[in-house]
Image: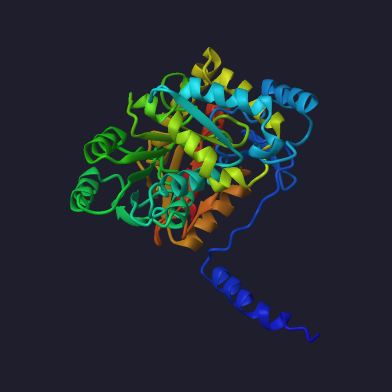
Amino acid sequence: MSDTSPALFEPLKQGLADIERNGLRRRRRIADSACAAHMTVDGREIIGFASNDYLGLAAHETLREALAEGAQKYGAGSGGSHLLGGHSRAHAKLEDDLAAFSGGFVDQPRALYFSTGYMANLATLTTLGAVGPSGGRDTLMFCDALNHASLIDGARLSRAQIRVYPHADAEALDALLEASANEGGTKIIVTDSVFSMDGDIAPLGSLLELAERHGAWLVVDDAHGFGVLGPQGRGALAEAASRSPHLVYVGTLGKAAGVSGAFVIAHETVIEWFVQRARPYIFTTASAPAVAHAVSASLQIIGSGEGDARRAHLATLIDSTRAMLKRTRWSPVDSHTAVQPLIIGGNEETLRLAAALDEYRMWVPAIRPPTVPAGTSRLRISLSAAHSHDDLAKLDNALQTLSNRL
């Protein structure tokens, strides 16, 4: 058999060369220690501003112990999908805990646990959009222009007709909904709560009013709000005091919760439909029960006085960082969340600044297209309750020095 692999590799090599030439190549770094404010990465001690560990729980001793306890009780893996032997008591308890913790926005709330946020969003949009005899082809999905990639992919895979509205523009969305009054079947509005590359928050009250007026579902991906926003960290819908049967809520557990996985909460009828029809749920092995056991322990911390104290400290860090970034020569995004972007502009300049900060032993990732629009490459400073004000002072000193030097 002839070896055709060199010819097969050529388009890949050319594509990689293009990525490199445009300053878009991504490189992984290796963490040698637990996710924390101070880490060992690639063999060097650094201050990390790269993770989404907003409450500083990833290395919390209680969660370490809960994970070990769960492994002792349930073993290392689930052994199967949730519908074929892999649904443990730990999974069932976590779903009950999540529904009780963040399900106050709907009557008869029920939660469904997923291995990742990506899978939760794919499941939500492909399954909710497939209701009706057409299998979703007459569904209209109205998506914020800056939605996360998992929401974009879920919308595309849903077979729905997609309408994109300008970022956070409720008036434009209203116009689209009005124009579609005589079209299609199911209507679904899709938005992040906190937008992960800008740190701003969707106008959830206005979006819900539109969903109710136009008879649409409102799907809210609260990946970067759960655990941080709302009373006791119960999430963006609790923060907005939203309550409606039109709501479908997605949250992730690998960010503020400090563990891994994700969940969807909605009326129990919606969740039962997902159990019966959501392919990303049905056709995958359930996550390790020990992980679910640890997440239940995390919910206890998030909703406790300790959780309140961590959120209060995080709020002071956010205020300090906002003031700090305004003193640089670059362009901060006006964010009141733990995501603090600093727009630099070009890819190469952004990479140079990230590399210069690394010389100060600070890990601040460079975010470039296609994650953000061309010409808006940025540093994404992620704050954690594990950070100290001394950590911020060191970042401030580095940025002010580099602002004058680069």
Along the viewing direction, whichever of 375 and 268 lies nearer the viewer: 268
| Residue 296 image position (x, y, % from top left) | 61, 23
Q: Image check: 156 left or right of 385? A: left
Total labels drawn: 0
For the view shown, which residue lies furthest in the front direction? 133
Residue 154 to residue 315: above or below: below
Residue drawn at 44 percent across, 47 percent down: 125
Residue 239 to residue 76: above or below: above
| Residue 401 visible at all | no
Residue drawn at 61 percent across, 48 percent down: 358
For the view shown, which residue lies furthest in the top direction? 305
Along the viewing direction, whichever of 159 and 201 lies nearer the viewer: 159
- Residue 41 placement: quadrant: top right
Residue drawn at 43 percent across, 57 percent down: 156
| Residue 122 image position (x, y, % from top left) | 50, 48
For the view shown, which residue lies furthest in the bottom direction? 2
Along the viewing direction, whichever of 29 and 138 lies nearer the viewer: 138
Q: Quadrant of the N terminus?
A: bottom right
Q: Image check: 10 left or right of 234? A: right
- Residue 340 placement: quadrant: top left
The colour scheme used here is rainbow
| Residue 339 image position (x, y, % from top left) | 46, 39
Along the viewing direction, whichever of 203 and 154 lies nearer the viewer: 154
| Residue 171 visible at all | yes
- Residue 203 placement: quadrant: top left
| Residue 344 image position (x, y, % from top left) | 43, 54
